[in-house]
Amino acid sequence: MLKGSNTPVPTSPLRVELGWRAGPGVPDADASALLLVSGKVRSDADFVFYNQPAHSSGAIRHEGKRTAGGRVTDTLLVDLTRVESAIETIVLAASSDGGAFGQVPGLYIEVQDTTQGSPVARFDNPGATTETAFVLGEFYRRQGAWKFRAVGQGYSSGLEGLATDYGITVDEPQQAAPAPTPAAAPVAAPSAYTPPPPPPAAPPAAPPEPVRLTKVTLTKAAPSVSLTKQGGTSGTLHVNLNWQVRKQFSGWSSKFGRPAAMHSDLDLDLCALYELTDGSKGVVQALGNAFGALHQPPYIHLDGDDRTGAVSTGENLTVNLDRKNAFRRILVFVTIYEGARSFADLNATVTLQPQHGAPVEFFLDECTVPSPVCALALITNTGGDLVVQREARYLVPERGVSPQRTVDYAYGWGMNWTPGRK
C-alpha cells in the first residue's frame, strides 16, 4: 500500500504484525494500539502496549515478539467485532528503544486474516531518520464497515510524545518540591473573640495512576538489572515464558542425526531452583506436582501447565517479593517434557514483570546444540539488592542424566534427585 491509501478489512480476527530486519546495532521496536473517540483516548485504559497488554473489551491484545529468519516481529491480535461502538479509530503505532527508526531497516506493518492465514493489507514504511515513534496505520469505521489506512506519521519524541498526543497521562520522574521560604513569625494581635477554624475540606479524589512506559531489555552486552534500583522489590514478580515453533516438522536433522520434529503437542515446563537464607533448597516444577506456594516457603508458585506458548498464557511462575529477605538465589529454567528433542527451531521470549517497577524481558538465542534444558534467569539477593541476570544458557545432559540434575550440576545447587512424572 502507498502512504495515505486505504482498503477494507474483514471483521474476522486479525493479526497485526510490526516487522523489521534484525542485525548488529539495530534498535528494538515495540507495537502499540490506541482506541480513540474524536481523536483521543477516553482514558489510559484505551492504550495497549507492552506494559498494558490487553484492552478490557477483549478487542486488542499485545501478543509479543518473535525472531525468525533474520527478522523480528511484534504482534497485536485484533478482534473488530469486540470493539465498543463508541470507538471510531484504532491507531497502530511503533516506538523504538535504543535508537531512532533511521537505524531500523525494513520496517513494515502487515494485517493478516487469521482464519484464512493470508495478508489483507501491508504498508512498508518508506523511510525514517530521527523518528523514535511512528503511526504506521489505523483501523477506522466507514458506513458500518472497517477499513485500514496506511499512515506513516513520525514522532521525534518517542512513545511518550505519541501517547500524550492522544491524551495518555504518562508517568514522569518525581522531583523534590522546593523548600518553602521561611516566613517571619506571626505576632498575635489582641482580640476579644477568635472564631473556630472551619472544618477541613474533603480531600480531592486521587488522580488515576499514570501509564508507565519504561521497560528493561536484557542482552548479551547488558545482561543484568537491579530490581531494587528499579523499585520492583515488593508485591509479586510474575515470570512468563512464551514461545512459537518456527517449523511444525523439519524432517530428519542433519545436525543431530535423528528426527528433530517439533509438533503441536510440544510441552515445555517452566521450573525454578531456589535456595533460601535458612539454607533450605528445592525445586518448583510440574513434575511430582511440586508447584510450590506463594505465602509460605518457598514463596514461589507455578501456575498450571500450558502447551500453546501464547503470551497471554504460556508458562507462568510467581515470586512473592514481600518475602525477598528469605531468598538467597532463584534459578529459573525450562525443560522440554515432550514433543521435541531439543530447543532447535524454538523461538521464545522471557518476561519478568514486577508488580511495582519496569518489566524485564529478553529473548532466547538460537539453539545450535541438542539441548532439552535451558537456564533462563538467575535472581540473586546480595545485601538486600535483588539482581536479575540473563542466562539464556542451553545445556546438554550427559547420557542418563536428567535435565534437572544437569542444571543442578551447572549451577552447584547440590540436591538429591529422584524420578518424577506429571
Image: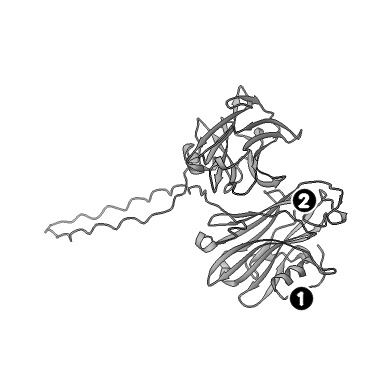
Mark nearer the viewer, 1 or 2: 2
- Where is residue 390, by image quadrant? bottom right
Horizontal and vertical percent position of residue 63 = 66, 45
Give neighbour class at mark 1: few <14, some 14-19, many 20+ (Cα, 10 Å).
few
Q: Is 270 on the left-hand or right-hand side of 142?
A: right
Residue with the mark numbered 1: 416
| Quadrant position of the N terminus in the picture | top right
What secondary structure is found at the residue carrying circle 2?
loop
Residue with the mark numbered 2: 345
What secondary structure is found at the residue carrying circle 1?
loop
Q: Is 259 on the left-hand or right-hand side of 278?
A: right
Which residue lies at the image location 33% right of the left edge and 50% below the top edge?
Answer: 201
Task: Say which amino acid is labelled 2.
Answer: Asp
First in sequence, mark 1 or 2: give its number.
Answer: 2
Horizontal and vertical percent position of residue 73 = 66, 43
Horizontal and vertical percent position of residue 65 = 66, 47
